[in-house]
Image (cartoon, rainbow, N blue to C red):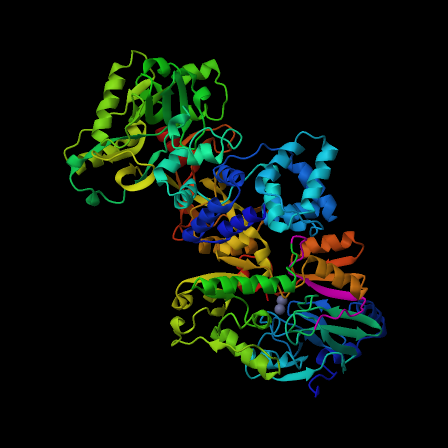
């Protein structure tokens, strides 16, 4: 099943030829189980990359979002929950799959995938080399969303964490309250004869929201990009409410009181005009900020994210027991300083993942 | 406060005017009377006195949220608003309360009578009993700044919808000196007499910029005069008192003491719309001369001599105590002319002259002389037009001269705030001086969002040096900067200060060596300063 991932790369052969004096230096360096390179997060002991952003031979993928799962890798290893969407998005690629918790030996590294609670199939990747354990979080959130397998903390020595929302101003609306807000908004629009157009990411957030919606209020229509992902997710055995795909023939008059799930960029495009009088909304963590809410110019902003909020990040880090922390995407410098003051040996990990700043929040919160 | 917070959220989040007006109208029909009055007051810039410094609030919020000061500061710089930052970082409330808006305002007034420790306890208690939006609004009230995107026009329309009164009448009622402490909902909105308050101004009539002379019809239908470059003002002589209002509803009476004698020079029951100008030897001085007097509560004697002010009269709104705004412009003009003609020698009052013209070409020529006579363009008014309220199309047009422009090089960029947080939108521009670049102005507006995004990405990749939030970038991009005037300024490295600088366009076609020089700028100063 993982035949592609065997030891014996050119690098390894080269290392075997080194003289013993040089080996000492290598053993010291080996305490860094993972390193940040210009291609991705690299594991020398197993000669593989985690979520690489440039083509490499062996890629271990935390989840199927486009900034973490990119095309052009020689081979992919991901969870069985991630693989279908990844194949759907990247086309004809070679993917080996593992289940949560099962261990795999790759070179000198022992690797296992653990639930990250971010989107269906998303994983943290645990790498153990000679008793040293490092964990790459990928993207994660700590609260259960009713869709993804909930986040499970993994004990480790070093934790590479995302911090997309690593500022104390971010605190998410509890899911029960959020559910009420969205359904109330939809019901009020339906009563007033308006279509409700809700902008959200196609993978993860869209399905999470679908499961919160009350289908008694009206029909649910979906943008093609979202419906394609729905199909893949449904095929994995996840139950979603009935949805109607929006096509060129779709006539709003036939769907009074509808809620339309759209990709963020479709919300204020000509595509959305076919629904007539409408109230628009975005579902995103950035909606916590009034300035962004106003810049996006929708009628409503629902504060919901598949990333951890400030308290979530701090709790997750504490639960790993790690003393060494690397912060990646988001407010990395700020978050690092905060962690240092909390007594961690904290660093910034330089990556190419999206989610920094909010110049274009609608596209980059993956 | 819950209702007010819901109203605020509605207005703040919606982009549709109809939705905002409906929400306001609904609120004006249902909220407690004192809350309605306070809502009008807050949305028209009348706010409770500031009771506490921003520094104290920051300290207390950081303490409650258990955050180091630097992290609070960093959060604040991303959010761009102190009250919002505080509302977001505080832990969720443990108490609940259902106190209406006006009571919260009284609570804030009460807090101002307490010592620091008691005030802190009071504020922390409030924070702990309010959910995020209400907490944000409460803190906004504390810090005193209360600007949200509601124009006076929107308030007036919503009130009209809710009370059935005509908009112009309501607009008039909302003008002037009142505060929620001196007025009630009944006295301000329900009562029928907007002139009950002797100091109350009329809403200003404002013009749009003229698109094309072609739409105006016959030249005979129009009166043309200079558009003077001063401060638009409304002079009110009633009950033996004199009041001078700015367009922004600031009372300026005490800033221009030399106009006080108009109380004697003009008959009682007179209201004149005009332009306050610094004026000497029967000629207007440049706006720079007047500017020295803006922002001063008292005027030193030397300024009164160097830059004496007059009122250049445009129009008359009240005559013999009668509101005459409905009369045709020509008739009002006759009354105004009689008054100015009869005013005694030395009165600081002039009639803005009508320009003689036989055809539109004459007017084009007159406009071209604007800078030479110290005006910023022409005003065209239809001879039979009434004096309307607010900015209206059709009868009045301003025909401003084109701004001065200069091609400058971008050298520093800084991120904006709030809406524009994390976009580099605040730029410093330089002119060339040999091999050097001399900074001479900042500008913040005038580009499209797409252009700001493009420049932001470029700044990120091309930062040479950081000075705190400011980034130095290579001098490669040229922008056309427009401005209304310039004056010598020893505080600026370049020796000049621009008036109303903004970016007219990004000159992608221009290489840096074609940007303007310091010598060009000095020449402009000599010609137009
Ligand atoms: Zn993601
Ligand atoms: Zn990500």
Residue B127 position within the rendered picture, expressed as x and y whole percent measured from the top left? 68, 45
Residue B27 position within the rendered picture, expressed as x and y whole percent measured from the top left? 49, 47
Please identify the quarter of the rendering in which residue A64 is found.
bottom right
Q: Is residue B527 left or right of residue B469?
A: left
**Can see residue B409?**
yes
Between B153 and B190, the one lying in front of the other is B190
Queried whether the magenta region covers residue A164, the answer comes back as yes
Residue B270 position within the rendered picture, expressed as x and y whole percent measured from the top left? 32, 21
Q: Locate the N terminus of chain B by quadrant.
A: top right
Report the label total.
Answer: 0
Taking the image as four quarters, which one is ligand 1 found in?
bottom right
Between A86 and B199, the one lying in front of the other is B199
Q: Is residue A335 left or right of residue B237?
A: right
Q: Is residue B339 above or below residue A194?
A: above
Q: Residue at x 60, y 82 (%)?
A: A84
- Magenta span covers which residues? A150-169
């Amino acid at each position: 099943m993982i035949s592609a991932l065997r030891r014996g790369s050119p690098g390894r052969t080269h290392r075997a030829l080194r003289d013993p004096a040089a080996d000492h230096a290598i053993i010291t360096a080996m305490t860094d189980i993972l390193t940040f390179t210009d291609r991705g997060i690299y594991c020398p002991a197993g000669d593989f990359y985690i979520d690489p952003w440039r083509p490499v031979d062996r890629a271990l993928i935390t989840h199927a979002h486009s900034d973490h799962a990119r095309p052009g890798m020689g081979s992919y290893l991901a969870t069985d929950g991630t693989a279908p969407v990844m194949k759907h998005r990247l086309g004809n690629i070679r993917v080996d799959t593992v289940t949560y918790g099962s261990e795999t030996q790759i070179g000198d590294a022992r690797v296992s995938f653990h639930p990250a609670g971010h989107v269906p199939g998303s994983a943290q990747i645990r790498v153990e080399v000679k008793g040293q354990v490092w964990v790459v979080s990928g993207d994660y959130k700590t609260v259960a969303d009713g869709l993804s397998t909930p986040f499970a903390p993994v004990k480790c020595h070093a934790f590479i964490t995302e911090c997309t929302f690593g500022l104390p101003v971010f605190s998410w609306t509890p899911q029960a309250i959020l559910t009420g807000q969205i359904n109330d908004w939809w019901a009020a629009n339906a009563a007033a004869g308006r279509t409700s157009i809700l902008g959200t990411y196609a993978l993860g957030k869209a399905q999470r929201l679908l499961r919160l919606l009350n289908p008694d209020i009206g029909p649910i229509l979906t943008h093609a990009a979202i419906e394609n992902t729905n199909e893949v997710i449904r095929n994995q055995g996840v139950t979603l409410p009935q949805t109607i795909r929006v096509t060129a023939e779709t006539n709003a008059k036939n769907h009074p009181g509808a809620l339309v799930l759209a990709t963020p960029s479709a919300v204020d495009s000509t595509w959305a005009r076919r629904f007539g009088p409408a109230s628009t909304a975005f579902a995103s963590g950035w909606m916590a900020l009034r300035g962004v809410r106003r810049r996006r110019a929708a009628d409503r902003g629902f504060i919901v994210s598949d990333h951890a909020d400030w308290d979530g990040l701090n709790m997750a880090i504490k639960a790993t027991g790690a003393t060494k922390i690397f912060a990646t995407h988001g407010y990395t410098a700020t978050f690092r300083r905060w962690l240092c003051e909390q007594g961690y040996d904290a660093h910034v990990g330089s990556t190419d993942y999206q989610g920094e700043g909010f110049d274009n929040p609608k596209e980059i919160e993956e | 406060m819950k209702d007010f917070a819901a109203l605020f959220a509605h207005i703040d989040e919606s982009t549709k005017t109809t939705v905002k007006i409906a929400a306001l109208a609904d609120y004006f029909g249902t909220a407690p009377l004192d809350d309605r009055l306070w809502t009008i007051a807050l949305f028209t810039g009348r706010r409770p006195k500031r009771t506490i410094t921003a520094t104290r609030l920051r300290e207390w919020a950081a303490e409650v949220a258990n955050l180091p000061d630097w992290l609070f500061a960093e959060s604040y710089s991303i959010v761009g608003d102190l009250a919002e930052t505080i509302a977001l970082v505080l832990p969720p409330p443990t108490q609940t309360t259902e106190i209406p808006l006006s009571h919260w305002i009284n609570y804030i007034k009460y807090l101002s009578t307490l010592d620091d420790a008691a005030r802190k306890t009071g504020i922390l208690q409030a924070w702990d009993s309010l959910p995020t939006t209400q907490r944000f609004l409460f803190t906004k009230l504390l810090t005193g700044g209360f600007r949200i995107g509601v124009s006076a026009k929107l308030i007036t329309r919503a009130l009209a919808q809710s009370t059935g009164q005509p908009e112009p009448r309501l607009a008039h009622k909302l003008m002037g000196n009142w505060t929620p402490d001196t007025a009630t909902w009944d006295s301000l909105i329900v009562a029928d007499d907007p002139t009950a308050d002797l100091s109350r101004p009329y809403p200003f009539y404002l013009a749009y910029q003229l698109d094309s002379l072609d739409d105006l019809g016959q030249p005979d239908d129009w009166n043309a005069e200079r558009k003077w470059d001063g401060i638009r003002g409304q002079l009110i002589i009633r009950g033996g008192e004199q009041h001078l209002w700015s367009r922004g509803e600031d009372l300026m009476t005490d800033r221009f003491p030399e106009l006080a004698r108009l109380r004697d020079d003009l008959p009682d029951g007179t209201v004149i719309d005009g332009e306050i100008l610094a004026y000497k030897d029967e000629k207007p001085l440049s706006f720079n001369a007047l500017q020295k007097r803006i922002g001063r509560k008292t005027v030193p004697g030397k300024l009164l001599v160097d830059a004496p002010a007059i009122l250049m009269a445009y129009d008359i709104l009240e005559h013999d105590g009668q509101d005459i705004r409905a009369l045709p412009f020509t008739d009002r003009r006759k009354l105004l002319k009689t008054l100015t003609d009869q005013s005694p020698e030395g009165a600081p009052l002039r009639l803005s002259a009508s320009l003689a013209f036989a055809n539109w070409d004459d007017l084009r020529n007159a406009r071209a002389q604007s800078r030479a006579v110290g005006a910023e363009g022409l005003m065209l008014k239809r001879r039979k037009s009434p004096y309307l309220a607010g900015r209206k199309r059709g009868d009045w047009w301003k025909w401003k001269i084109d701004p001065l422009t200069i091609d400058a090089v971008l050298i520093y960029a800084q991120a904006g705030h709030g809406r524009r947080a994390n976009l580099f939108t605040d730029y410093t521009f330089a002119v060339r001086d040999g091999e050097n670049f001399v900074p001479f102005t900042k500008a913040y507006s005038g580009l499209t969002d797409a252009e700001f995004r493009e420049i932001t990405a470029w700044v990120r990749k091309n930062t040479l040096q950081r000075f705190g939030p400011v980034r130095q970038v290579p001098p490669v991009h040229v922008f056309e900067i427009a401005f209304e005037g310039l004056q010598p300024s020893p505080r600026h490295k370049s020796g000049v200060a621009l008036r109303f600088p903004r970016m007219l366009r990004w000159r992608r076609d221009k290489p840096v060596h074609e940007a303007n020089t310091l010598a060009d700028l000095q020449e402009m100063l000599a010609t137009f300063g």
